[in-house]
Image (cartoon, rainbow, N blue to C red):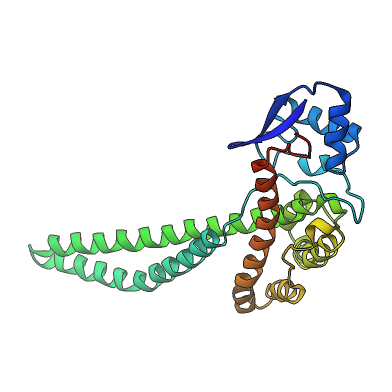
Amino acid sequence: MGTCFTSSGITASGARSSSSGSGKASHRSGLEPENAGRLAAAGGGSGALGGSAYKPGASSLIPQAPVGGEYPIIPVKKSSFGLWLGTFIGGFFLMIIGMILIIPAMMVTAAAAAAASSSAGGSAETAGAASLGIGVLISFLLGVACSITSTILFYINIYRAWFCLQAGGPQTTPGKAVGFLFIPFFNIYWVFVAINSLPENWNRIVSSYEDLKAAPRLGETTFLLLCIGMFFPPLALIMSFPMMSQMCKGINFFAARRLAVASAGYSAFGGR
């Protein structure tokens, strides 16, 4: 089965008319014909990597590209730094507002309860205090929701960044990079692999292929300081902004390559 890009992603395009056509498609992308066939078979009826760039086990299906050769098109989605920034800042301030207002809300509630027990007009004050309390609770819960969303986006971008490197022989896989960060105690070590080692792997790989020379580089000092920030949270807070910005720019470079190939009418891994 061949594959082609459509507006909704990578889909199956039908059988190749001849084995020579398949061989040419594989050669253009730096894939051996047997590797291309293995990718197509793994994708089943939905293409080499299916409709999603993150099908389980997808990173293991990307063949190694020879150094100095063509780097295959990686089916990665674009990342939005603005989305992460909005949820991060929004969650931070909403939670702060909720925590600041919770004490006045408790004081107003106590005063309203006292007024209700001493006069008939206390019911209105009680209702006002209840409304204030609900508002504070909503603000805090929205902040928590935004913070969770920004954390999820952080891990998604870590996954995508490592996913982009799989054809260049990186230090680890995207699944391990993210998954091992959830192992208690071990993650203190692993964060220096999944995050601190990412710029070194990234810069080495994008420098090894002519068609990746224009890719943005990642700052090793930025990622190192973020890891050190585990023990000094204000540092991690500050460094998270340039780190996420650099990662999103790098991921979007690979996503732009995919979109450029799609608009030219090529298949996911080369060929028409």
Q: Residue at x 21, y 65 (%)?
A: 113
Q: Residue at x 81, y 27 (%)?
A: 41
**Who is closer to the viewer here, 87 or 70?**
70
Please say whether residue 53 is visible from this viewpoint. Answer: no
Please say whether residue 202 is visible from this viewpoint. Answer: yes
Asked if residue 249 is positioned above or below residue 53 in the image, the reply reads: below
**Who is closer to the viewer here, 168 or 131?**
168
**Who is closer to the viewer here, 9 or 247?**
9
Residue 157 point in image, percent of width and height: 66, 56
Quarter of image, res 114: bottom left
From the viewer's perspective, is 111 left or right of 148? left
Q: Residue at x 72, y 75 (%)?
A: 228
Residue 102 point in image, percent of width and height: 36, 69
- In the picture, which quadrant includes the N terminus? top right
Residue 205 point in image, percent of width and height: 84, 60
Quarter of image, res 22: top right
Asked if residue 45 is positioned above or below residue 54 in the image, the reply reads: above
The single residue placed furthest to the left in the displayed view is 120
Q: Residue at x 30, y 69 (%)?
A: 105
**Who is closer to the viewer here, 190 or 100?**
190
Quarter of image, res 136: bottom left
Asked if residue 221 is positioned above or below residue 217 in the image, the reply reads: below
Residue 194 point in image, percent of width and height: 77, 61
Query: How many numbered marks have been drawn onto this rendered protein structure?
Result: 0
- In the picture, which quadrant includes the C terminus? top right
From the viewer's perspective, is 243 left or right of 143? right
From the viewer's perspective, is 102 left or right of 40? left
